[in-house]
Image (tube, rainbow, N blue to C red):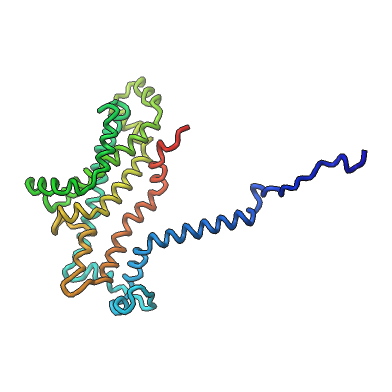
């Protein structure tokens, strides 16, 4: 037998890149195209915010001369006007938004945790209650605006921070119940059965065992409720006039009888975006894990 006959046949298919080796040129090219597309979409979506950021550092003359053009002459005058300008109380607007958003988060968590547990584990309301909750989430907010306005006027709650807390909590209760109900379904019932065998009642099981396991879902609900409450405009403009005005409505005060202060509005917009943006970035990992519960079934 010839030596060549004993050799293994060579394959015409090129060898794949090893796990520790470099990527193939074609694969690298596809990755770069995906990155470029994602960056382009991100810039397009955030173009209004980027424009507001640039405008907030431009002088009034540069804004009037070329609203969309960049300028080498930057100024912080608009940020000073936001806090010290006559007729502007941006600090109070900002504080109102913080209290409304945090108060809404607290109310939603206090109500939705026992509600979701009662629906999922104790069978409260039957199998159709969650569908009803989901249906309430689909109703437009304008449907509740006039009833809230009439009710608050009758009870003397109009133009108060507490009233806006309750209104935003009411709008976000279905969202909190749905997210926490999905998280509870993923928790094994054996944990609660073991706690019951050890003598723990329902309240002890909920507070000591269930709540720590629901931490990602609780953070996800907190972030979503905070963002929705902070960005609310409809209830803020209907249920407040001066004392409870948040930043979403207070920015309109920069539109005066003498003109629109675009630089001041842009500075107020940039400042109002920072808290929810930082909050969402800080809790991003918990937000993703909390919203993905129930999405994959093994």
Q: Is residue 154 left or right of residue 238?
A: left
Q: Residue placed at 41% from the left, 42% from the top?
A: 289
* Most distant residue in the top direction: 197
* Most distant residue in the front direction: 12
Residue 254 place in picture, x, y as percent:
21, 68
Total numbered circles: 0
Residue 283 place in picture, x, y as percent:
38, 48
Q: Is the residue 241 above or below the residue 296 in the image?
A: below
Q: Is the residue 285 above or below the residue 257 in the image?
A: above
Q: Residue placed at 37% from the left, 22% from the top?
A: 193
Residue in front for this viewpoint, 253 or 214: 253
Residue in front for this viewpoint, 254 or 89: 254
Q: Is the residue 251 above or below the residue 258 in the image?
A: above
Q: Residue placed at 59% from the left, 56% from the top?
A: 28
* Most distant residue in the right direction: 1
Residue 140 place in picture, x, y as percent:
23, 47
Q: Is residue 10 left or right of residue 253?
A: right
Q: Is the residue 224 above or below the residue 65 in the image?
A: above
Q: Residue placed at 26% from the left, 44% from the top?
A: 172
- Asked where in the image residue 294 lies, by quadrant, the reply is top left
Image quarter where the N terminus lies is: top right
- Asked where in the image residue 63 lies, by quadrant, the reply is bottom left
Residue 238 place in picture, x, y as percent:
15, 54
- Asked where in the image residue 255 lies, by quadrant, the reply is bottom left
């Amino acid at each position: 037998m010839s030596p060549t006959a004993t050799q293994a046949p060579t394959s015409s298919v090129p060898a794949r890149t090893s796990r520790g080796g470099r990527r193939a040129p074609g694969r690298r090219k596809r990755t770069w195209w995906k990155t470029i597309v994602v960056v382009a979409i991100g810039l397009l979506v955030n173009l209004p915010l980027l424009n507001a950021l640039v405008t907030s550092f431009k002088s009034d003359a540069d804004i009037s001369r070329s609203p969309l053009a960049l300028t080498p002459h930057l100024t912080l005058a608009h940020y000073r006007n936001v806090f010290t300008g006559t007729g502007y109380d941006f600090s109070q607007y900002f504080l109102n938004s913080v209290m409304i958003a945090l108060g809404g988060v607290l109310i939603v968590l206090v109500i939705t945790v026992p509600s979701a547990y009662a629906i999922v584990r104790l069978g409260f309301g039957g199998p159709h209650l969650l569908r009803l909750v989901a249906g309430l989430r689909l109703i437009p907010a304008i449907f509740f605006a006039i009833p809230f306005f009439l009710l608050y006027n009758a009870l003397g709650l109009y133009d108060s921070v507490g009233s806006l807390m309750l209104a935003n909590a009411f709008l976000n209760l279905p969202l909190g119940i749905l997210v926490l109900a999905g998280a509870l379904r993923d928790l094994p019932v054996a944990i609660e059965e073991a706690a019951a065998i050890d003598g723990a009642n329902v309240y002890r099981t909920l507070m000591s065992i269930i709540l720590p396991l629901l931490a990602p879902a609780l953070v996800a609900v907190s972030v979503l409720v905070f963002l929705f409450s902070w960005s609310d405009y409809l209830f803020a403009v209907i249920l407040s006039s001066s004392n409870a005005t948040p930043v979403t409505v207070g920015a309109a005060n920069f539109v005066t009888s003498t003109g629109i202060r675009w630089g001041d509005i842009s500075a107020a917009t940039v400042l109002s975006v920072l808290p929810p943006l930082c909050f969402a970035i800080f809790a991003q990992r918990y937000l993703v894990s909390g919203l993905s519960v129930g999405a994959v079934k093994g």
